[in-house]
Amino acid sequence: MLLPAVLLLAAAVQASSVDSLYPNLTDASVITHPTYDPIPKGAKHESRTQPTDGSYNYCSMPHPSVSFYQAPEPVRNGTANATLSAVVYVQRHQKRTAYHIYPYGEDQVYDCTDVHPSGTISPANNSLAQPAQVYAATFVDDQNPLNQYFTKSTCQFPQMTIGGFLDGVQHGQELRALYGDKYHVIPSEYSAEKVWLRSSTATLTQNSAAGVVRGLWPDINSPVALHQESGNIDSHEPSCDRADALLSAAKSAPAWNHHLNVSADLRKELEGMLFTNNSDWRKDWDHYNDNFQARLCNGYPLPCAQDNSGKCVSNDQAASVFAAGDWEYNYYWVDRENVTEAIQLTSGLYIADLLKQVQDIASGKSSLTYVHNFMHDGDMGPLAGSLGIKSLRWPGMASNIAIELWKSGSATYVRVLYGGSTIRSRFGNMEWMALDQFVQIWSRFVPHDFVQQCAQPL
Ligand SMILES: *[C@@H]1O[C@H](CO)[C@@H](O)[C@H](O)[C@H]1NC(C)=O
Ligand SMILES: *[C@@H]1O[C@H](CO)[C@@H](O)[C@H](O)[C@H]1NC(C)=O
Ligand SMILES: *[C@@H]1O[C@H](CO)[C@@H](O)[C@H](O)[C@H]1NC(C)=O
Ligand SMILES: *[C@@H]1O[C@H](CO)[C@@H](O)[C@H](O)[C@H]1NC(C)=O
Ligand SMILES: *[C@@H]1O[C@H](CO)[C@@H](O)[C@H](O)[C@H]1NC(C)=O
Ligand SMILES: *[C@@H]1O[C@H](CO)[C@@H](O)[C@H](O)[C@H]1NC(C)=O
Ligand SMILES: *[C@@H]1O[C@H](CO)[C@@H](O)[C@H](O)[C@H]1NC(C)=O
């Protein structure tokens, strides 16, 4: 009976790969006793040597790919005669160096001599002089006395790494193979009538777009518009006093304090080794995650003690750090009290932008068939929460949401993917949902009067 056993095994592997996106993060005991392997796996260059199977991979999250993509069930089983008409896609930028280095000295030397970052400017009128190409070459000066607090790194933290750039190109190639070659919503040549790209104002998301766009259209040789709102009013992260107040309240709630208590011993051990005993590092588990993620995703080891004792952060300690990061994301965007209002006031204006695009495309008012946004983990978290995700681990590098619009006769259906597989949502079956129902669900997260709501004290 060899064949059935093999089939069973294949089915089990298939199921468990997507399960890795949804561990149960409700109970803070997951921090001291992780029920899954939370440790990021990465290398300096491309982080993936083989096609992904849809499982969680912090350093390069799964995305829609012919290697595991499945059409929606009613299309697969012949119940619906529908064609994919458009995709609205949002992703976090690809992998990078760290934001947070140790306050009393960072020992890890990061090497960025293998990438040339740049922010260029050129006249829109190409009859005028065009720019010479320059790039940022970060150098180390031994004469600078401040060097003692820093490594001899040749990176501008948190710059994108060579692996991040290459992963972006591959990400674009795989999207094109699926949504271009197979489903024809990504046109084979870039066209402003069909394609609209947006990023945050950060260099990271622009660098990410540069790699992904190369993968989407390998032969493109004219500049492409990457739409941005003015940083002062950018709807993807507007300032809002009440959102800040909700966050403070969430960070003094019993569940939050309990998770800090559960992880207090770990914190003490790490402070002894890394001299991270300042308030910024103590308020949550963000900085440890960021610093350890950047190391592991780019081929550097976990840190060793700064006192030359030879002790290094163990795998068990790191696993708890990463599980704590996952717990915090799930708390912020799934489990905390007032989560709906918190999402509204954090990402509601951005959700309104995306909803309008979805509706305009569905009604035929817009000719777009492909929209691609380059954003941050701080966007992916609330967006996934607004779509009712059942459990949310830290949205890793290049984590992504795809909103697919399927046309069947005159009706439009929505299918929502997270990490390339249908999102497991508390709000209904997002494998196949009538457009109106989807719009109704998502609209709950659009603030009715943002300015007035933000001014209300808690
Ligand atoms: C997750 O764990 C909590 C606490 O242990 C439990 O109450 C809950 O039912 C679990 N949820 C799922 C979906 O298994
Ligand atoms: C096809 O899938 C739909 C949606 O999941 C389901 O309702 C229907 O029963 C399935 N039909 C067949 C023939 O399997
Ligand atoms: C499915 O829809 C297409 C396009 O509207 C049509 O040409 C085709 O005949 C339909 N197929 C079935 C099986 O209904
Ligand atoms: C572009 O620059 C050329 C050369 O200076 C000028 O003749 C032309 O009017 C400019 N075009 C626009 C649209 O400004
Ligand atoms: C939740 O909202 C209510 C009503 O505005 C408020 O009284 C309460 O303090 C909030 N709690 C948290 C943790 O946000
Ligand atoms: C956390 O620990 C502190 C100090 O030991 C204690 O006062 C507090 O009640 C604990 N909080 C929770 C939620 O366990
Ligand atoms: C952190 O620890 C170092 C070394 O023990 C000490 O010099 C420093 O004052 C401490 N800083 C804080 C904010 O506690």
Image (cartoon, grey):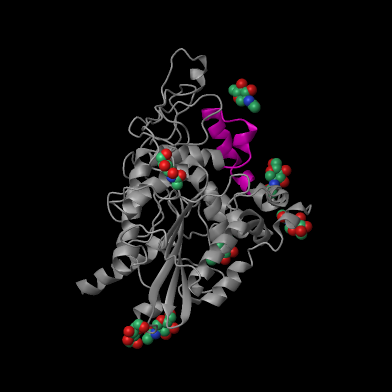
Camera-nearest residue between 406 and 131: 131
Q: Residue furthest right?
A: 457
Q: Is residue 68 visible?
A: no
Q: Residue furthest top?
A: 143
Which residue sits at x=35%, y=53%? 171
Q: How many marks?
A: 0
- Which percent across, then down, holds residue 158? 47, 36
Camera-nearest residue between 306 and 341: 341
Dominant secondary-structure state across the stretch colored magenta: helix
Which residue sits at x=33%, y=49%? 214
Residue 271 is one of the magenta-drawn residues: yes
Which residue sits at x=63%, y=54%? 346
- Which percent across, then down, holds residue 389? 53, 63
Q: From this view, report whether residue 40 is shown above or below residue 181.
A: above
Q: Is residue 251 left or right of residue 438?
A: right
Q: Is residue 337 left or right of residue 321?
A: right
Residue 103 is one of the magenta-drawn residues: no
Residues drawn in magenta = 259-285
In the rendered image, which quarter contains the N terminus? bottom left
Asked where in the image residue 77 lies, by quadrant, the reply is: bottom left
Quadrant containing ligand 2: bottom left
